[in-house]
Image (spheres, grey):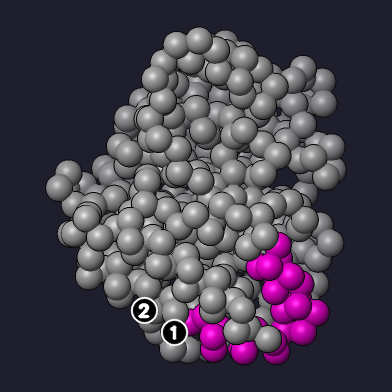
Amino acid sequence: MCDTLCYIGAAGTVFAKNSDRPVSEVQLIEAHPRRAGGGRLGTQYLEIPDPGAESLLISRPQWLWGAEHGVNEHAVAIGNEKVYTVADPYAAPPSLIGMDLVRLGLERGDTAEGALEVMTALLEEHGQGGIADARAREPYFSSFLIADPTSAWVLETAGRTWAAQPVDTSAAISNRLSLRTEWTRASEDVAPGSDFDAWRNPDAPTGPANSRLGASKTFLSAVSQTNPVPISTLARHVVSHLRDHGQGPWGEPGREGRVIAPPPYALPDGTGVSVCLHVRGYQATTSSMVALLPSDAEAPLRAWVALGSPCVSVYVPIFPPTSVPTQLGSPGLWHRLALLRDQVEADGTALVGVRAVLDPLESDLWDEADEIADEPDRWSAFAADSGSRFVDALAKVG
């Protein structure tokens, strides 16, 4: 389960994703520098030719080569979703998985359209298959949201079959196929005018995806009605949506307000399955990112990343792709946040105390990052300091 969205405004695009994975699966935030081309590149299950890579910031499950989401030096951001299709992922041989395609699109794409072309060409050449959830030993196919400062695409797949639609102003995707006949590009086996919903598995329940997708669309609709707002302010609003526990946005950085505990249970019809996910013993949000992709080439690329569940974490400001706190790549820090999530799930009232410690730090970090946004010589020091302060704050949480 995951939720991904974007909003394209005059000043650029805001992209965001909650990555929902098995509750015990470690996810790490990593910066990767440019890589020269040549030789072979080892993905999760395949070796393929390596033309080189752009520098990028990714969130990666520890056992995987690929990424759940990320942003590269050209301000291209990508996130993926598990989808259930009539094509059988168990019948597909190990090849590329959705997370491979996210990372490869970021490594090789300098625009959203360019990343789309990279990903679909690789999909058609190598196919899609292999275990993508180690805990459940489950393979699956993916959909993707691909964005840059002025445009975005929704890409949906079923094995080697795919369709893509450009985004007008905003888009949200979740764990179900959502394209119908409005797609503008597709693989050769998709006839013109086809309803891509025909590739959706009709036996797979859509309730959990529908409830979260509905929440994201409601949020984006409200954004479009209140615009214009500064794009940095919109990033704060998006964080409050990513913390949604089923009762609407809360926890916006720098704004005091109510603290909403996780839902106590989750049902197959989608009840209790929230954007900040807490399906106990099965899946939870294990990493989250908001990225600001500026249309002004002189403006800095911005991101805010939360390791672990958004409700018990801090969205640490980052100037990607290189100025990243090393602490966010620590399995130990991820485990500390997972323990905190478990405590809050056992006793929802504990979240008030957690936020009382973390909210002031988050507010301070966002304000300080805004102040130095135009001073790149200070970004590295800020990254080192913010990581240390996050660790120190967690030590104070009871």
Residue at position x 76%, y 78% from top? 343
Q: Residues within 10 Å of mark 2 (few under 14, many from 20)?
A: some
**Up/down of 347 relative to 45, above or below:** below
Residue 379 in sight here:
yes
Q: What secondary structure predominates along the stretch shown in magenta?
A: helix
Q: Is residue 342 magenta?
A: yes
Q: Which residues are magenta?
A: 335-359
Give the residue at mark 2: 364
Question: Is 100 in front, or is 276?
Answer: 100
Left/right placement of residue 106 relative to residue 260 reads: left
**Up/down of 182 relative to 307, above or below:** above
The location of residue 398, given as percent across then percent down, is 68, 86
Residue at position x 82%, y 20% from top? 91
**Up/down of 347 relative to 161, above or below:** below
Question: Is 311 in front, or is 150?
Answer: 311
Residue at position x 84%, y 62% from top? 281
**Up/down of 195 relative to 150, above or below:** above
Left/right placement of residue 316 relative to residue 100 reads: left
Residue at position x 73%, y 51% from top? 25
Give the residue at mark 1: 360
Three-letter amino acid code at disc 2? Asp
Question: Is 173 in front, or is 31?
Answer: 31
Left/right placement of residue 292 relative to residue 81 reads: left
Three-letter amino acid code at disc 1? Pro
Marks 1 and 2: CB-CB under 8 Å?
Answer: yes
> Which element is circle 1 on?
helix
Q: Is residue 177 magenta?
A: no
Question: Is 130 in front, or is 43?
Answer: 43
